[in-house]
Image (cartoon, rainbow, N blue to C red):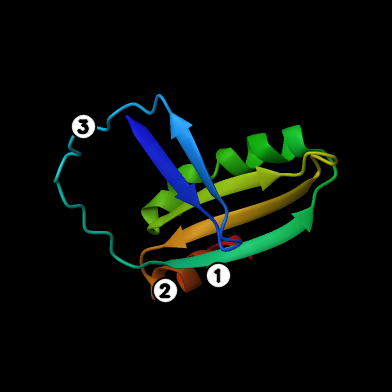
Amino acid sequence: MDAIFSCKNNKTEKVQGMIAIEEADTTISVVMPYKISTIKHSVADYNKWRIEYDAYDSVRLAYGTTHFVISGMDNTNSIIVIDKIEDVQKQKNLDAVQS
């Protein structure tokens, strides 16, 4: 099978040996929109901070909050925490408990 690719610069490129793609699964997944909270800050020691942060997971889950943590490649002590929030009022209650 051959495929032709074209860019806006009007050049075309023929690619040989493309593999045929089988018919994809037609299952449809519905994804509901959700709210997130993003926090970027630095910690003194990422490994120590992460142990303490993960120990609080059960509390976050009880309030309907899941999270994703990203640490910097050059500076692992620079982090971004992304919380997925199911219920804004529950998140506010969680924030009150944490402070």
Q: Residue 6: where, in percent of width, then height? A: 50, 53
**Distance CA(mark 1)–CA(mark 3):** 52 Å
Q: Nearer the viewer, residue 26 or 33?
A: 26
**Distance CA(mark 1)–CA(mark 2):** 12 Å
Q: Secondary structure at mark 1?
A: helix
Q: Residues within 10 Å of mark 2 (few under 14, many from 20)?
A: some
| Farthest-out residue, left | 26
- On residue 88, the disc is 2
Query: Which residue in the structure is indicated by mark 1?
Result: 96
Q: Residue 52: where, in percent of width, then height? A: 65, 39
User: Which is more N-terminal, label 3 or label 1?
Assistant: 3
- On residue 22, the disc is 3
Q: Residues within 10 Å of mark 1 (few under 14, many from 20)?
A: few
Type of amino acid under label 1: Ala
Name the mark nearer the viewer: 1 or 3.
3
Q: Nearer the viewer, residue 27 or 23?
A: 23
- Quarter the N terminus occupies: top left
- On residue 70, the disc is none
Residue 63 picture quarter: bottom left
Residue 71 picture quarter: top right
* 25, above or below 68, in the image: above
